[in-house]
Image (tube, helix red, strand yellow):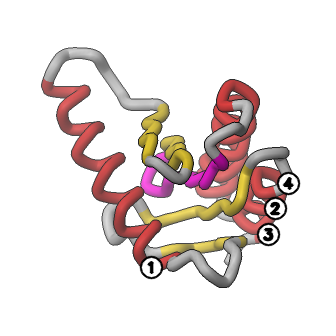
Amino acid sequence: MSDAYRDAVIRLSHVPGVSGAMVVDAVAGVAVAQELTPDVSGTAIGALAGALFGRSAQATEGAGLGELDVVQLRADGGHVLVAGAGSLIVVALLADDAQIGRVRMEAQHSAALVRQAMETGF
């Protein structure tokens, strides 16, 4: 695992309101790096985030809107925010009362760090 991936996960997971963070292979839905509480299934979240982002990206491009940047899913217990980083995605699990704007900004920054690490081979 790249230090950049781990750093992105740690940075994002320490934002107030974030209960976990992951870097996931966008196609396979498999975690590359994660920091989650023991009660959260990384396998389930990775699969959900990969499918959600992949299908949404296809629909966005098909609608002529260009490349997808961020997807947010809201459920009774909180939110899942997914930011694109090339062939990887950055995932944040948020409490219902989290400051979504701040988390989104941090997720996009983490995604940029992950993308840069992939491009430079680190």
**Residue contact at pointers 2 and 1, CB within 8 angstroms:** no
Q: Is residue 63 left or right of residue 10?
A: left
Depth check, mark 4 against mark 3: the one in front is: 4
Residue picked out by circle 1: 43
Looking at marks 4 and 1 on the same chain, the residue that comes earlier in the sequence is marked by 4
Residue at which label 2 appears: 10
Foreground residue among 97 and 61: 97
Residue occupied by mark 3: 3
Name the element at disc 2. Answer: helix
State the predominant SS element of the stretch in magenta: strand
Residue 110 figure quarter: top right
| Cα distance in 3D space between marks 2 and 4 | 6 Å
Magenta part of the chain: 85-95
80 in relation to 29, above or below: above
Cα distance in 3D space between marks 4 and 3: 16 Å
Q: Disc 1 on helix, strand or loop? A: helix
Residue sitting at x 73%, y 51%: 18
**Pointer 3 or 1: first along the chain:** 3
At 68% from the left and 62% from the top, the residue drawn is 20
Left-right relation of 15 to 60: right
Picture disc at residue 24 = none
Which residue type carries mark 3? Asp
Relative to residue 11, is residue 88 drawn left or right? left
The residue that disc 4 covers is: 14
Disc 2 marks a residue whose amino acid type is Ile
Q: CA distance from mark 2 to mark 1?
A: 18 Å
Q: Residue at x 68, y 72 (%)?
A: 36
Amino acid bearing label 4: His
Report how far apart the C-alphas of labels 3 and 1 lie in the structure. Answer: 21 Å
